[in-house]
Structures are given as C-alpha cells and as structure tokens.
Image: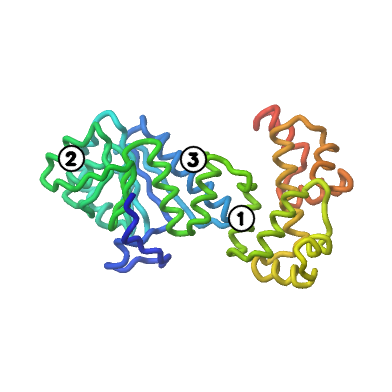
Amino acid sequence: MYLENFERARTAVATPVSGRRSLSGDFVFISQDDSVAFLAEACIDVLRSANRLTGQPAYDWTHIRGEAGLSQAGTICGPDQTLVLIGGTDAPWQPSAERLITLRAAIRNAARVCVVGAAVFVPLAAGVLATKRLAVHPSFRPGVEEGPQSPEIVEGTTCHHKAMSSATGHVSAIRMMVDLVGVRDGEFTRVALARDLGLNEPQAECGSGEHWRYKRMAQGDEVICEALQIMRDHLEDTLTVGQIADILDVSPRKLERGFSEYLGQTPLKVYRDLRLERAHSLLAQTSLPVGEVSVACGFSNVTLMKKWFHRKYGQMPGEVRRHAFAGAGRAA
C-alpha cells in the first residue's frame, strides 16, 4: 500500500500547490448509480465513527446519488474538499460527455480525489489522472492497461499516491477511508477505528469508544493510560482517586494534574463517563433490570445513575431500554 506524499495539514482553504495533496475533512461522495449508493453510505459511516471516537466533529460529508444529481449540483467540489467517486465492480463507469465536463471540473478542483472500483475510469476518461499508481479491480485491469495514460497498477487493494487514493472494490473502500482518517488523526486513531469497524481482530486491550478517546487524548502518557486501564477494569467495584493513585504509586494530586492537563477532566468525571457508557451498552444490548445495570456499573443507587445518565445522554435509561426492545417508533 502506497502512502507517500500525503499532506497532513488541515488548512481551511488549500493553496494551489499544497491543496492538491492535502487531505480535507470535508468529503463529497458521488455514486455511479443507485446500486452502489450503499457503499458511499458505508464510507460515510467510517467518518461518522471517526467523529464519535475522537469526540470531535472533524469530518463532514455530502452524498450525490448517481449522475442525475450532478445537473442540480452547481459547484460540486471545492479546493478544501475531498472528492470520492464510488463505482461498482460490474461495468466501467462511462459518464456522458455533459457529465464528464462536470466531473472533470470537480476532480481538478478537489484537494484530493478517491476512486473506488469502476470509478477509476472517470479521471482516465477526463484526462486528469493525478497519479501513475492505482489499485484496480481485476475485472477492469485490461481496460485501464490499454488506456492512453497506462498507469502502474499496484498489487494491493488500496493505493494512496500523490493527490489520489484508489480502492479496488467494496471492502477495500472501507479500508481506504480508514487510512485517510489515520493520516489526519494518527496511527492510534486508525487502529482504534479499524477495530471499532470490525476490520481488525478484537484484542483484550481494545476498550470502549470512551476509553479509546481518552487514551488518545493522553498522548501516550504512561500514568494516564494505566489509570484509564485500571478504571476500565474496575467499572463495577468503583475505586477512589486515592486508590487508583496508590496502585500507580503516584500522589492523588499528580494524577489529578495529569488528567486536567491531558484530558481536560477530573479523574472522577472520566471514570463516570466510562461507567455511563457501559450502562448505556447494557441497557441497549441486554435485558438486565435497570437496578442490576446500576450495580454492574458502580453506581450506589439507581437514582444517582439516572441523574448522570440523563446529563450525559439527554435521555433516561428507560428510554434506551424501550428503544432497544421496541424500536425507535414504538419507543417514542
């Protein structure tokens, strides 16, 4: 997999030179037709998961379904946006002459272009291929190899080279998106996102979304990371800050300063967030009575759990439970 030439800067507006190789967090997806619109939505879900894991609205997106949506689109893609063309794997994407003009302008204007499956033929047909290396689906290799630009076809299922990223098909498109998030937000986030999406085998230390988010914010600080692991291991039998500090052989004050510096929170607030997330999972995924959920998550009584749960999620535990068993319509 080629990953060279990524520009990690997050400038609001890309410059004419650096913009071509920058990776914007604002994505524009265009599906070849309705049959592959689901794949664009799956790629969007990667961005949605990244926002959730990092705790920030770092990624935005729009989705144009099929070429028919281009006529009303106006300026499709700005210089501060990443363009993602989603094609299928059955037939080449061959836009009409009118649509090709629109797509050519979008490709030229985008900060970065990503092509999936049959979409590889769009920049080739438009004569604006931004790279000499591409990941191409086996069914399309003959057509790409015989084209006038004849790029190098790499053996992997994804490729990131210069101002273009490419993926051979449906599954590799998800991995391509995870790679792009990793370039912007670091390897730690890439690994966490891949595990969250089920692309990597789960490991014992994987942790929850809140755990990963706080661990990422800790930037590798040993004391904070170990404290987070201790909290995660003791969600039911809640420890005090002093007890956690004793286990780590540091003073409670040092632990509190570290949490404030790296996480912007007190240890008690972070601990409570981890316990509340666990409570939310149990309410949504099990039939445990609310009282037992409260005990399993280290709350001294149900009333206290309800108070903090509502403050964090904006709804009561009973609403989450009804939604889990009755669906959104009946829960309402």
For label 3, count other residues whose C-alpha is less than 10 Å away and answer few (under 14), some (14-19) or many (20+).
some
Residue at 50% from the left image edge and 41% from the top image edge: 200
Classify mark 1: helix, strand or loop: helix
Q: Which residue is mark 3?
A: 199
Q: Amino acid at mark 2?
A: Val
**Looking at the image, which is closer to me, 143 or 111?**
143
Q: Position of residue 88 (x, y in %)?
A: 31, 33
Residue at 18% from the left image edge and 40% from the top image edge: 144
Q: Viewed as shown, does residue 325 lie left or right of 175?
A: right
* Residue 260 found in image quarter: bottom right
Of the two numbered discs 2 and 3 on the same chain, state the one appearing first in sequence.
2
Residue at 36% from the left image edge and 29% from the top image edge: 35
Of the two numbered discs 3 and 1 on the same chain, state the one appearing first in sequence.
3
Q: Which residue is mark 2?
A: 144
In the rendered view, would you say 288 is above or below 317?
A: above
Classify mark 3: helix, strand or loop: loop
Q: Position of residue 236 (x, y in %)?
A: 81, 46
In the rendered view, would you say 185 is above or below 275?
A: below
Q: Which residue is mark 1?
A: 213
C-alpha separation, residue under disc 1 versus residue under disc 2: 42 Å
Q: Amino acid at mark 3?
A: Leu
Residues at marks 3 and 1 touching, judged by CB atoms closer than 8 Å: no
Q: Viewed as shown, does residue 174 lie left or right of 218?
A: left
* 2 or 3: mark nearer the eye: 3
Colour logic: rainbow
**Looking at the image, which is closer to me, 280 or 183?**
183
Q: Amino acid at mark 1?
A: Arg
Classify mark 2: helix, strand or loop: helix
